[in-house]
Image (cartoon, coloured by chain):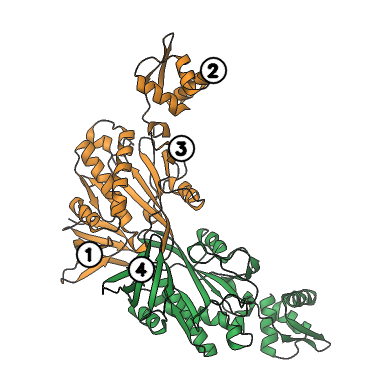
Chain colours: A green, B orange
Amino acid sequence: MKGEILRALRESGDYVSGESLSKELGTSRVSIWKHIHRLEQDGYTVEASPKGYRLLSSPDLLIPCEFPGLEQRIHHFREIGSTMDAARKLAEGGVEQGTIIVAESQSHGRGRLSKEWLSPEGGIYFTVVLRPKISPIYAPRMNLMASVAVATTIRRLFGLKAELKWPNDVLIEGRKVCGILAEMHAEVDAVHFINLGIGVNANAYVSQQEKKATSLKEQLGREVCRKEFFRSVLMELQERQALLTKADLVEEWKSLSATLNRDVRIVAPGEEIIGQAVDIDSGGALIIKGKDGSLRTAIAGDCIHLT
Amino acid sequence: MKGEILRALRESGDYVSGESLSKELGTSRVSIWKHIHRLEQDGYTVEASPKGYRLLSSPDLLIPCEFPGLEQRIHHFREIGSTMDAARKLAEGGVEQGTIIVAESQSHGRGRLSKEWLSPEGGIYFTVVLRPKISPIYAPRMNLMASVAVATTIRRLFGLKAELKWPNDVLIEGRKVCGILAEMHAEVDAVHFINLGIGVNANAYVSQQEKKATSLKEQLGREVCRKEFFRSVLMELQERQALLTKADLVEEWKSLSATLNRDVRIVAPGEEIIGQAVDIDSGGALIIKGKDGSLRTAIAGDCIHLT
């Protein structure tokens, strides 16, 4: 109902009387008034005058009614422990492909390899439940897809030169603006679900001590519209889902890469690889050329750019 | 304590007095008597005479104290819903590599692709929690490893010609004696855990109506020792875990295959492939040659032998 009232106010762009809202939506004027009040609690500014209601401003929150067409799929939280944990429970319970869990902040945000992901207000933290009909052997490409979608959005909306650090960080001027975590539940030859988590330091405060991190706000010197960013990333993801098993995705990743042709150190459980990053293979693994000319392949791990 | 009493009785092979047991194990004679009573409830036959206690027989149950060295790792249930479900909870809770959940029967045994797995008493139903340091791209090989371990055990212990049907059924004379289900939780580039479930129609009743199924008992005309079988499969699995990323495993699977060189129909979500099975690739995918000579690759699905 809140969403329908919002839509009516937006379509009008002017005053809409409580009476016409109540007729259009088939509910009482008291009920309309209650929902307007709830919208105000959500952060909307609604002028109420004898001429009716008029929408003055909307909050930059990632709430379902701000995303017409996606309302049913979005589960929004002001604060949550971790969107990944919530998504896992929902996915195990059978929610459909494309369900999104988004939070304004996370108290226990999780990153790759059991690391913490700081998630203060102002950032964008969400997990999409995907049920691709693919073998787990294509799963590592999920990282490529997500990082390409985020970098493309940053370039398109803000003209910033977002680049990709293998396997799945998005950097601006060498500093991390977005992290990606994809978790999978699968039979060994068939994926049940992949939960794709994306955390973006959009308007979130990034400590000057953290020289490795940056935010869109810091880069631009102004706040960005989180809603616009979120909508764009979802669209870019949507467009690339059919490409998961296709070579185009790998080419797109390469064209945005900050890692290729650099000297790197890869730290993985039980091994360390140092050399020049020369390519990624079709599975998203990084190919590294050692000083002796030998080639080695890194499937997972932390990547440090040495040059 | 039950395990220690059993060990003492077995090592002696003769009467052991309650007094010496109580001294050796540092507990009271009343406590010894209580544990002997519990052993009897578990199905052990213990003679109690003025000369002491003597072990006459052990039940063919897959209880931890029958597997010295593995006691701490085995969680045994007389009946359970599904060892896969129990294993998932334990694995998510962090149990270590090699933890085993085994049940005498399952009320909701699960097979591949959401099928039911009938699990009456007499069969062997267990799940091993594995935490291999591999990428999910090697996960499909888990199926190869498990089916090879079971077929090798059947051949070695009973001289029956067990063969493998792609991707992971074990057949005797074309009928299924064992099913395998492997479920994985992973970051897309690093496995958290793979739960490997194995169900064997050892002494379980197999309806004559089920022409596609058989049991070891039916094939041999006698009951088998389930404990011996279980121990052997665990050993064969153990030996092959280091091979997960090695070519030897694929070669071993091929040497036991009933599928290669046969005409097959592969039924997968949204597609059907018919042709001659000519090979499996390093990832365990089946390569099928169509009538026109073209090669196609099946990653998952049901395989029907047409010839």
Q: Identify the image quadrant of the N terminus of chain A.
A: bottom right
Residue B287, above or below B166: below
Pointers 1 and 3 within a single chain: yes
Discs 2 and 1 lie in a common subunit: yes
Quarter holding residue B211? top left
Between the C-alphas of marks 2 and 1, the distance is 65 Å
Q: The disc numbered 4 marks a residue on which chain?
A: A
SS state under label 3: strand
Q: Which chain letter goes with mark 1?
A: B
Q: Nearer the viewer, mark 2 or mark 1?
A: 2
Q: Given the image, what chain letter belongs to the residue carrying mark 3? A: B
Kindly identify which residue carries mark 1: B287
Q: Which residue is mark 2?
A: B30
The reply to the same-chain question for discs 4 and 1 is no
Residue B247 appears at what percent x and percent y? 23, 58
Q: Which mark is residue A273?
A: 4
Badge 2 density bin: few <14, some 14–19, many ≥20, Cα 10 Å: few
Label whose residue precedes the other's in the sequence (2 or 1): 2
**In the image, what residue type sits under mark 2?**
Val
